[in-house]
Image: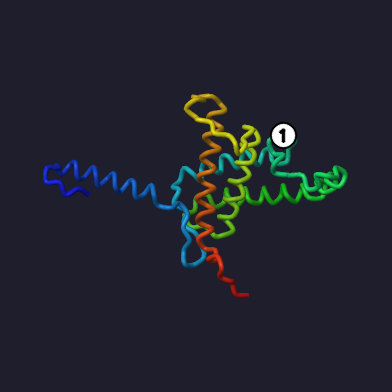
Amino acid sequence: MSDDPGETEDERRRVGDLEAFLARLARRKIGPRSDGTFRQRFGEHVPEILVSLADQLDMIVDSDDPAVRRLFPTAYADDPEKDAGYQILARDELVQARRDAIRTVRASAGKEILTEDELTAWMAVTNDLRLVLGTRLDVSEDDDVELDEMSDTEEAELRRIYEFLGYVLSEIVDGLSRVLPDEGTQSEG
């Protein structure tokens, strides 16, 4: 707050409101708790959006939609026959693991306190959504597209969702990483 004697009470209140808003904005959205759980501070809308997108992923995860190809990468690039066998053996298990994570996200979306398993499911689903959207958008590491240039196209909307999911994923990874042992220390066990 400013100590300017010429400032009115209303101006001081607005500056205080802005400072409080900026402090809330800067606060991390996922934080570890002493009992091993995590507090999520996204509010209600981010989990709702995540569930909505996860429902859409659930509808295509076991389809032939080309957008899901990055969810099932090639295991044996040099041996197509061996890779086909792997895909036959592993695909059902991978689909089931993704559907389990989606169910966990649905079940935990309304909770402020999440277990590590629940938060890990949020991370997995968010990452899968980014992979599918990135494939659909043909995103590469070299992409540096200004969304303003794209205006209100469907591609711009999908890119906004892709960027939003990147933010959510970053917050989740940051929250989970704060419980990892410091580099150079050894865990007991």
Task: Give me the residue at 52% from left, 25% from top.
Answer: 150
Left or right: 152 with respect to 62? left
Q: Image height check: is 177 above or below 69?
A: below
What is the x, y in percent for residue 97?
69, 51
Q: Which residue is mark 1?
A: 66
What is the x, y in percent for residue 79?
85, 45
The amino acid on which the numbered mark 1 sits, given as a three-letter code, is: Pro
Which color scheme does this rendered protein use? rainbow
Question: Which residue in the rendered view is the most extreme toward the right?
Answer: 81
Task: Give me the residue at 54% from left, 43% from top.
Answer: 166
Residue toward you, 4 or 107: 4
What is the x, y in percent for residue 163?
52, 39
Question: Which residue in the rendered view is the most extreme toward the bottom?
Answer: 189
Locate the C terminus by quadrant: bottom right
Q: In what element is the residue under mark 1?
A: helix
The crowding category of the residue bearing disc 1, from other C-alpha atoms within 10 Å (few below 14, some 14 to 19, many at least 20), is: few
Image quadrant assignment for residue 55: top right
Q: Image height check: is 6 above or below 111?
A: above
* Total tally of numbered discs in the picture: 1
What is the x, y in percent for residue 120?
59, 55
Q: Image height check: is 170 above or below 159?
A: below
